[in-house]
Image (cartoon, rainbow, N blue to C red):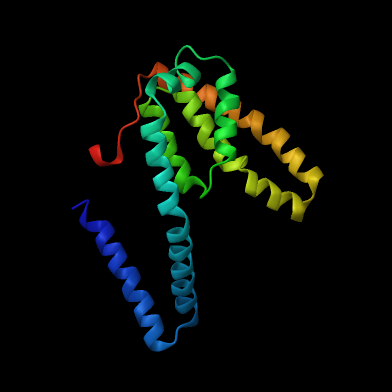
Amino acid sequence: MKAKFPTLLMAVYALFILCSLLFGYQPGKEIGENFISFVLSMLKILPGAFILIGLFEVWISREKVQKHLGEHSSFLSFLWVMLLAGTTVGGLYVAFPVAWTLYEKGARVHVVLAYVGFAAVCRIPMIVFEASFMGIKFTVVRLLVSVPLVLISSLLLGRYLTGKKWEMVSPGSS
């Protein structure tokens, strides 16, 4: 039954868009156009990003990840994941598979959580775009507030999850 619900939901969505096109329902037509635009933009980004993720999985050894981001790494591991997250393209669509790869290669839970948080707030293209529209002062203040909050929340949540013996599972294994 669980697997049928998403399929039913997609069918209802497709039927809504089709009926909107047939009967000229403008909000439904705009929703369909936005969906097509979104799919096309993802098709431009994701294939290349997933190729890079695959190369990352093959080229970067488990030992190197464990050394810099694992159990015996220093606080410098947060700087490493901030730099990695800053260069992530494609937003969280790409950050989550990279986070999974880091976890699988032995990165600590709170380092993986910090990577996801940094990928949401510290991507270089986003910072440049934000600074050009909102100004440098706004961008600096936002980073000065958000970076420590990401660090604190990832440390606290990582400590809590580690204490509960929590482990990340693959989406296909549930």
The residue positioned 55% from the left and 37% from the top of the image is 85
**Location of residue 126 in the rendering, given as x and y in whole percent from the top left corner:** 64, 49
* In this rendering, position of residue 151 left or right of residue 161: right
**Location of residue 111 in the rendering, given as x and y in whole percent from the top left corner:** 50, 25
168 or 63: nearer the viewer: 63
Position of the C terminus, as image quadrant, is top left
Does residue 174 appear in the picture of this structure? no
Name above or below for residue 160 compared with residue 38. above
**Location of residue 98 in the rendering, given as x and y in whole percent from the top left corner:** 43, 37
The residue positioned 57% from the left and 24% from the top of the image is 78
Name above or below for residue 103 compared with residue 19. above
The residue positioned 68% from the left and 46% from the top of the image is 127
108 or 79: nearer the viewer: 79
102 or 145: nearer the viewer: 102
In the rendered image, the residue lying farthest to the left is 1
Does residue 139 appear in the picture of this structure? yes
Name above or below for residue 98 compared with residue 161. below
